[in-house]
Image (cartoon, rainbow, N blue to C red):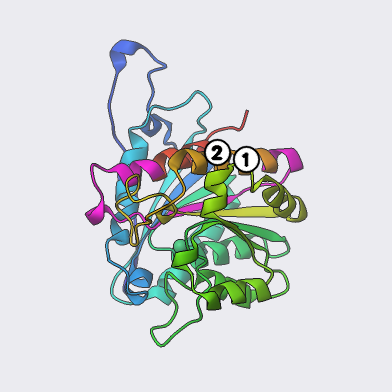
Amino acid sequence: MTVYHTAPQPLSGRSDVEDGPSAKRVYHYVQNNAPNAILGFACDVGVNRNKGRLGAKQGPTAIRRALANLAAPRTLIPFTDLGDIEVEGDDLELGQDTLAQHVSQALLQHNRLIVLGGGHETAYGSFLGLRLAYPEKRIGIINLDAHLDLRNIGENGPSSGTPFNQIRKLDPKGFDYLCLGAAKESNSEALFARAKDWGVNIVFDTDLLADPYCAKAIIDALISRSDIVYLTVDIDLLPHYQAPGVSAPAIRGVAFTTVEFIISQILSACKAFGKPLPLADFVEVSPPHDKDDLTAKCAAILALPLMSSNE
Ligand SMILES: [Mn+2]
């Protein structure tokens, strides 16, 4: 076997007992059978096949560590740590299938699952698991990413650049995909043409930077016509100075505060339209390239509203 499930290690962080019982950190909210859950996908096989720099396999450990030590907001919901799916060697397909099984199981027991990647190959396993759990539901996909990740499968097989191409193949008619933050210089004309053929909605990084509200109508439209929403956040959307530890750093990038605002728009729209968001993932954090854990902290802070009640 080259794919393993590793049990969760206890999370830890600062302890400020002198400040009283409300001085809680995120790690204090880990419980068995909690409403929400986190699951790691320790894999960068897809990044390797996509000719990117390696390290995303260490993402789950780094994001968990950053998350555990954040001050817990009053609205934080208890969560269960489901450990990691770890992929060794080149066994991406088995890894994604294993992830899918664990995701679908987790969705039977928890309201919301946050998957900590891993390269963006995480998304294919995540989505397969969501479909297993909700075979009849129309799934709206929102990808916050500098890249469309719609590439055709080449001789190396599926990679971190192909997940949404693979997802479309499962159900071409039902494919409803919105990419927020795409950078023109990071996607070939072939990919933009494919996106157009397949009815993909795109909002460019430059447009989000000029007006953080510019995606609201398109986000609302996707969420209102879907039964459930799958959110996938590629941390390489952020500019290199905020997220240096990614497989492919962005020069322009969409600023952290804007990404945070877009996630809040998505959560507000889900609430307004009464549409569940059972699954989200945070991918492409590459700790060997990180500086002062900045990138892992970006992912952790962006995950926090998804782990909290939306009051
Ligand atoms: Mn991506």
Query: Looking at the image, do the residues carrying marks 2 and 1 touch, with CB atoms under 8 Å apart?
Result: yes
Q: CA distance from mark 2 to mark 1?
A: 6 Å
Q: Residue at x 51, y 41 (%)?
A: 258
Q: Could you say where residue 8 lies in the image, as x and y percent from the top left?
A: 34, 48
Quadrant into which the N terminus falls: bottom left
Q: Could you say where residue 31 lies in the image, as x and y percent from the top left?
A: 44, 36
Q: Residue at x 28, y 66 (%)?
A: 53
Residue position for label 2: 261
Mark 2 residue crowding within 10 angstroms, few (<14) / some (14–19) / many (20+): some
> Is 283 a magenta residue?
yes
Q: Residue at x 44, y 41 (%)?
A: 256
Q: Could you say where residue 58 lies in the image, as x and y percent from the top left?
A: 28, 56
Quadrant hosting residue 118? bottom left
Q: Residue at x 56, y 48 (%)?
A: 208
Residue position for label 1: 265
Question: Which amino acid does the dot numbered 1 rest on?
Answer: Gln
Q: Which residues are magenta?
A: 270-298
Question: Is 149 left or right of 42, judged from the image as shown?
Answer: right
Above/below status of 289 relative to 74: below
